[in-house]
Image (cartoon, helix red, strand yellow):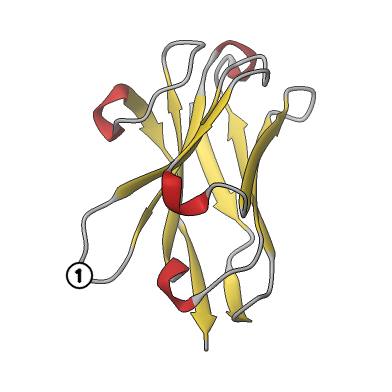
């Protein structure tokens, strides 16, 4: 599975961005997807995950109510809608695909990774 993340950019605090993750070369409809992020000088951290059907989602506490993960299986694409961004959200955002249909929160449970898209939030 190849993953291509896009949609990052430079925004101001309070703005929104919609990140996309286009998948190819695999069975997207049977795999759970996740978003992680890595800020400068910090470890990569879990952000959100969605099951293969899209019916089950799970979020890190620090994004609940602000970010929404979704997917369009007809387009082989997952999304992360990010609202009310603040400077602490500045990071490279990575999408990942697992080999199972359920949700996963640990990076080691994901077999495939995109290249990341940079989100920079200015104050």
Looking at the image, the residue that sits furthest to the right is 74
Residue 14 visible here: yes
49 up-or-down from 82: above or below: above
The residue wearing badge 1 is 41
73 up-or-down from 78: above or below: above
Residue 9 coordinates in the image, percent (x, y)? 59, 73
Task: Quadrant for residue 105, please give it.
Answer: top left
Q: Residue at x 67, y 63 (%)?
A: 17
Q: Residue at x 61, y 50 (%)?
A: 67
Residue 98 coordinates in the image, percent (x, y)? 42, 21
Task: Quadrant for residue 56, please give it.
Answer: top right
Residue 41 coordinates in the image, percent (x, y)? 20, 70
Residue 76 is left or right of residue 98, and the answer is right
Q: Residue at x 39, y 30 (%)?
A: 112
Q: How many numbered marks have been drawn onto this rendered protein structure?
A: 1
Q: Residue at x 59, y 80 (%)?
A: 13
Residue 49 is left or right of residue 53, and the answer is left
Check disc 1: other Cα within 10 Å, few if <14, some if 14-19, many if 20+: few
Residue 92 coordinates in the image, percent (x, y)? 41, 62
Which residue is at the front of the view, 13 or 40? 13
20 up-or-down from 32: above or below: below
Residue 20 visible here: no
Which residue is at the front of the view, 66 or 24? 66
**Does dot 1 land on a helix, a strand or a loop?**
loop
């Amino acid at each position: 599975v190849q993953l291509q993340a896009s949609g990052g950019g430079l925004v101001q605090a309070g703005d929104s961005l919609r990140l996309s993750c286009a998948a190819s070369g695999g069975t997207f409809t049977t795999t759970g997807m996740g978003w992680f992020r890595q800020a400068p000088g910090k470890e990569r951290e879990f952000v959100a995950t969605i099951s293969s059907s899209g019916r089950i989602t799970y979020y890190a506490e620090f994004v609940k109510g602000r970010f929404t993960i979704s997917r369009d299986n007809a387009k082989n694409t997952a999304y992360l809608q990010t609202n009310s961004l603040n400077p602490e959200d500045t990071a490279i955002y990575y999408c990942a695909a697992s080999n199972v249909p359920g949700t996963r929160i640990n990076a080691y449970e994901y077999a495939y990774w995109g290249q990341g898209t940079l989100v920079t939030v200015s104050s």
